[in-house]
Image (cartoon, rainbow, N blue to C red):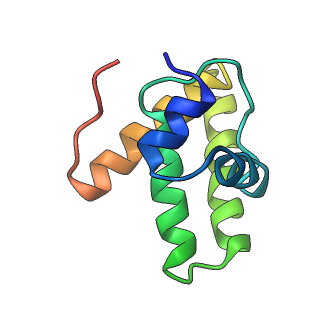
Amino acid sequence: MCGLTLSAEKCGKSVPFVMAAQKKFELPVLKEYSAGYAVLLTKLIYLSACAVPQKEINTLLSRERKLLELLKVPLPMGFVDIMILLAGCFTGSRRPAV
């Protein structure tokens, strides 16, 4: 578990940038974040930088949240951790150690 400052450092971004990204992507704002949070946020920032429309990113995240609610996965940390797993399945990267 790490705070916002450490998550921002892992993303290579400033704390205000990360806070703006949290709001932009409608991610949960917590006191502590899992180790995979920076990975998810970095991938979302890359999607945005690669000209994927914001509406499509938010739609994807919304659908994933609804799916996790149907599966009764505890949110909000469950959402972030599951998104990291799903992102790893499609990119071939491994989930970071928690």
Q: Is residue 12 left or right of residue 62?
A: left
Residue at 76% across, 58% down: 24
Image position, residue 82 (x, y; %) = 47, 33
**Residue 34 appears anywhere in the view:** yes
Depth check, front residue: 70 or 36: 36
Instruction: Name the image quarter holding residue 28.
Output: top right
Residue at 54% across, 58% down: 44
Which corner quadrant holds the C terminus? Answer: top left
Image position, residue 2 (x, y; %) = 51, 20
Placement of 73 over or under 46, stated as above or below: above
**Residue 83 appears anywhere in the view:** no
Residue at 58% across, 23% down: 3
Residue at 49% across, 23% down: 34
Q: Is residue 41 left or right of residue 97?
A: right
Image position, residue 96 (x, y; %) = 29, 30
Placement of 77 over or under 49, stated as above or below: above
Image position, residue 86 (x, y; %) = 40, 45
Instruction: Name the image quarter holding residue 55.
Output: bottom right
* Count of labels in the image: 0
Depth check, front residue: 6 or 32: 6
Depth check, front residue: 6 or 96: 6
